[in-house]
Amino acid sequence: MSSASEAKHPAQEFNQITETVADVIERPKPPKAWYVAFGIALAMLGLLAVSVYHLLTTGVGVWGNNNAIAWAWPITNFVFWVGIGHAGTLISAILFLMRQSWRTSINRSAEAMTIFAVMCAGLFPILHTGRPWMAYWMIPHPNEMLMWPQFRSPLMWDVFAVTTYATVSMLFWYLGMVPDLATVRDRAKSKVRQIVYGILALGWNGSARQWHRYERGYLLLAALATPLVLSVHSVVSFDFAVSKIPGWHTTIFPPYFVAGAIFSGFAMVLTLMVPARWLFGLKDIIKESHIDVMCKITLATGLMVGFSYGAEIFIAWYSGNLFEQYAFLNRAVGPMAWGFWIMVTCNVLLPNLFWFKKFRTNPFLIVGVCLFVNVGMWFERFVIIMTSLSRPWIPAAWADFTPTFWDAATLIGSFGLFFTLFLLFIRFAPMVAMAEYKATLPAAHAGHQKG
Amino acid sequence: MSSLDRTGDYWRSLGELEETREFQEFLDREFPEQTDATRVSRRRFMQLMGASLAFAGVAQAGCRRDEDHILPMSRRPDGYTPGEFQEYATAYELGGVASALLVRAYDGRPTKIEGNPAHPFSTGGSTALAQGSILHLYDPDRSRELRRRRDGGQLLSARWDEFRRFAREHFSRLREHGGAGLRFLSEATSSPTLRALRQEIEEAFPNASWHEYEPLSRDNEREGTRSAFGAPYRTLLRLDRAKTVLTLDADILVDDDRALKNAADFATTRDPDSGTMSRLYSVESHFSSTGALADHRLPLRSEYVLPFLLALKAELDPDGPTQTPDAEFLEEDEVQSFLRTLARDLLASSGESVIVAGYRQPRHVHDLVARINDLLGNAGQTVLYYRDPDEGRPSHIEDITRLAGAISGGEVDTLVMLGGNPAYTAPADLGFAELLGQVSTSIHLSEYDDETSAACTWHVPRAHYLEAWSDARTADGTVTIAQPVIEPIFGGRSPIEVLSLILDRDHESPRQLVRRTFDDVAGFAIDPDAMWRQALHDGFVPDSHHRTERPALTPEPRFTLSESQKQRRDRREDEMEVVFTPSSATYDGRYANNGWLQETPDFMTKLTWDNAALVSPKTARSIGLKSGEVVRLEVGGRQLELPVWVQPGQAPYSVSVALGYGRTRAGVVGGDEGEGVNPVGADSYRLRASDAPYFVTGVSLRKTGRTQLLASTQDHWEIDPVGKKERERRATRLVRQTTLEQFGDAPDFVKDVDDPYPDHGSTWQEWEYDGYKWGMATDMNKCVGCNACILACTSENNVPIVGKENVAQHREMHWIRIDRYFHGDPENPEVSHQPVACQHCENAPCETVCPVGATIHSSEGLNEMTYNRCIGTRYCANNCPYRVRRFNYLDYHEGIDEARNKVRHLLFNPEVTVRSRGVMEKCTFCVQRITRTRIEANNDRRRIEDGEVKTACQQACPTDAIVFGDLNDDKSRVRALHDRQRSYKMLWYLNTEPRNVYLARVRNPHPDLG
């Protein structure tokens, strides 16, 4: 079909896109695979609900955290999810400013993924506190107790970085979706849909003035969001870099974390998009060339991450600091070396397969590599947190860690939350930015060519 | 409950009500909300409710002062302010030896134990066991009711009246026959009152006999001195006068009835800043705390001590009667050089040396020790003897064996057991628990309805020592008075009360009896009442100690050795030796239900909530054992399964096993099979026979293929090689140490390290402390690792216990821990240890990372926790380089509001917040003590004086290793210690600027042994 599109009338082509994308929302029943996936996701979400209930009623002790390793899986999960949440903004903001037109096929879903990932991420720092019902004390607010947050703490910076990021991402996503929601509204046949999409479309009528303001606003938000891509994970990395713990206390963390975040974010986008384009017949919109570019970005960021690992180890040696040296030696050969080598294999070695065209075109191989990258990036955070906390300054206080059932349940549950939201998004919101996509088509510029 | 009937007319109506069955049931349920109101009439319900309120007034300890002096509070008694604590002198007895204590009570509610600094044989310090003993006072598992067994075996609750009626009748009948068939079994006791009562018993029941049994007894010393001097003698050590000390299988600084005094005396000789130090040699199988302090330690099987000692005597006195035995191990180079150097050192410090053998060693060893001390002129100088007051009695093991023989011979009809738990602690070959079933009337007075109570026809709840009048002698013989601080919470009775009942003279109160003994001991006085009041106030009878003498030796006998004692140190595994040691947590098992003690890590193994078979690394390797593997020890048909723990420094092919575990009726903490609570640890008494109660040889050790979780608070020996290497590298910086010789050459050696002190100043204007500036100094040369500080802190600061699983997950809550490192040869390592609490850093890494400002610096330099503000992000714990922060991962006080646990509320120190789930906590430098003293000082418009504020850990420390005070005070001790050359700050290179300094450890090895 794509080869034939050249010959089509532009209006026909635009219509084709609307039909393809809107069909996903409008068809009476989604494909069976959707039901299966949604069922699994809901079950996992249920597990999260049970875990959270158990956690809130019993205490943080349901996890394996201890007095030496005070942060364990929950913070690993937090950093992991925040990292995942990076691709969306990168694709929407930075690539938009750079006029990378291929982004339009995936930006909507990548942004949705970002928001859902940040939601999952936000869950963990709140739940991991000893008294989650007091977590709002981290937010500066006037109160009769004369409490005020302590702004020297990187955790405070986190609160602002992550909430800003979540807010801007959400605005960006929604703003970009308004014209498409209006399209869905206009095509809606049932009353409910008309009302719901009517409210969501905010009275969009597609006037030139609206389009003008929309595009200005979108551009401004993109400019606003761009620094956030770099800031959020830099700030998250400060949680570690500002502390006094060997293996954490390093200046390379901000760029290293940002590269890792984009790396994992792209891997996650690919993990979701490659099956989705097959499942919903979006192969003409999300083209192979788009997937190819994303694989290349994954490869590039993967190399950056690999370089960071090397630089960290080099600096540990070069600094002459024995504590740093031991922290890194312990990562590689200590009792948790398996985690380190999983991380190296998944994040440094496997992405190199993307040098080969075959690996960038075969959907199975792409998803396979990307799944490993996701695993590897979870392990990266695991290694950073666990190895450093388990063997810090005083050997008498060294400790090991055994995860509990609830550690795993909460992590799996967070995937449940993520996939549930994502599947609902696919079903009820236009998953491709139709309006934007159309604007990138040659047909959109046909009038100019013809003079 | 039964305390009601003593209270006279006032409670009569309630006492009558108590007779009814409904009320009894009601008491069982304890709380009115659980009363099923639908089944009783409204009138009855109101009656019960009213009674419960009245009863609450009796049962709540707030109103349980001694009734003799009760006064209305309309006018406040002088010197008493509600809410202020008062301290009372009292004493507790362990193994027949008293410890002089001070008890802190808030409104009549004891909460904390301290040593009695006024007592002549006390240093003001206290032991871990004494600190922990207060927990039992409020232990809901303590027996709450008297029980009798019907003929059918059914257990029924009974009341004291019933028992009194029974006892009157029963013992008056026995008296007619002079007490034939009547036996008494008591724990070892030095109480003069009990001794007097015992004499009366012996007069009243001439055909009865009295037995005494203590599972961990010091009788071998008695028997040894009996053979050396012709009569049994007890020894007192003057370690403060000793230049050379040799301990033989003896933990004189911790596991000893003179330990506090020994430790304090020893510490005075270990001050390197004075230029001279004593030298300590240890020869032992089990790695003890004393061994950890030794300048030279020789790990030897316990059975090798005798040949070693013979060789030493031959070396010291070549012309004497003793010949060097032909034992192969003595020829080994290490043993040879140790022996020669030791002998030279001992000869060089004649009259200023101490040789002491542990109570596990057989009498021949004690005999020889007495002879060598005499030979070296130590007797009367550094080793003092006093005549054992109980000359005639057989040893405890013999005594219990005789009693068992009498029971099985059908000679015993009535057995009265005053305390103790012989069904559990008696040697396994006696089968004592089964024998008890053959006694038609057996009465057991016990704090718990324990293994022995279960086999008896009567169980009488025993009063805690803080609930009863008594007296006892400290190790030097000073009569020390135990006053009750609270009425018996669960209606317990003391041995004195039971004996007076048997003598049919319980019209006299225990207080009167103790007073009468006092009058006897104290002798003539112009105003006996004033003297009595003074003695109660001080806690002891002045000048009542035993008189020491210098006994003459008998001719030396020939000592023979068994073949097993003559072999090499490397032996085969089927010839294992098993050494029975007391548990540092449960002692002989009596503290098994004490969560504080169970959770306190053993000083050497760092194990909690378990005992294990300790084997040396080489032994473990040769058999292929790893820590946690369960093995079966078997000897003489008896066997025991328990997990192995690889313990560096353990003597080769010698296995140490702690007694006092595997209790089946201890309570819900220590194990109660009736309640479905598994025993803590393995019952090693099952391996212990009357012929070898302290160590047994020829034991076979077999693997079972199973493993068991052991909860240790510190990494164990077996870690990855890279980690091990790093641990050793860091340990030398964390615990700075040197030798006396090198210290003389380079007194500032602590500063001479690769990592310089950071000299870059601060960018900010630093806070100036113009008021107080609190600081601490910990002298590692004095710390003996007795764990008293941990217990004292737990008790003072309401530190919760978390249980074995949580300890295994590294969630123990202790605010102070003792880090322990090994150096050198795993078979005979050096040990360094270091108490670590919050260092109260000037540049505290925890403070800057808290997002809600829950941990902040005070104007006096304390690093303070505001529990209410903490939301539990735990960032502070991560960022603390000392790892001293403790997080409440779970509600560690869960269930405390349940009816049966309510009594535990009374234990809390009311001045310290009980922390909830989800908040961080840590050492506060006992801020409540500082604040209290500051208020007092401010009221007097003066500054706090040096030594006025003592932290709980400092106060408990027997050796004064921990010193706290104001760094702004130039004359304060802590300031002086901070300024000592060997003071250093832990992890100084991090620029955290701790307020605690450590004084480096200085050893004093003999130059020849290097």
Image (cartoon, grey):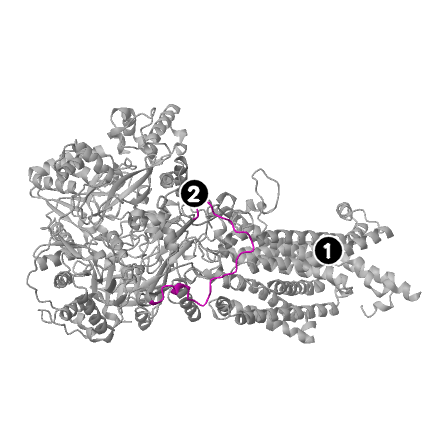
For residue B373, the mark is: none
Residue numbers of the magenta segment: B745-773
For residue A224, the mark is: 1
Image location of residue B531, percent across then percent down: 19, 35
The answer for which chain carries disc 2 is B
Residue A290, placed above or below residue B679? below
Q: Residues within 10 Å of mark 1 (few under 14, many from 20)?
A: some
Image location of residue B455, percent across then percent down: 22, 47
Q: Is residue B761 magenta?
A: yes
Image location of residue B767, percent across then percent down: 51, 49
Q: CA distance from mark 2 to mark 1?
A: 48 Å
Which residue does the image show at 74% across and 65% down from the upper left? Answer: A286
For residue B914, the mark is: 2
Q: Amino acid at mark 2?
A: Val
Q: Quadrant of the C terminus of chain B?
A: bottom left
Q: How many marks can you see?
A: 2
Q: Quadrant of residue A291?
A: bottom right
Q: Nearer the viewer, residue A252 or B758?
A: B758
The answer for which chain carries disc 1 is A
Left or right for A101, reference B887: right
Q: Nearer the viewer, residue B271 or A10?
A: B271
Q: Residues within 10 Å of mark 2 (few under 14, many from 20)?
A: some
Left or right for B483, reference B313: right
Q: Amino acid at mark 1?
A: Leu
Asked whether the viewer can see residue B595, the reply is no
Q: Nearer the viewer, residue B740 or B161?
A: B740
Asked whether the viewer can see residue B69, the reply is yes
Which residue does the image show at 43% across and 56% down from the upper left? Answer: B810
Left or right for A298, reference B241: right
Q: Secondary structure at mark 2?
A: loop
> Do the dots labelled 2 and 1 sit on one chain?
no
Q: Quadrant of the N terminus of chain B?
A: top left
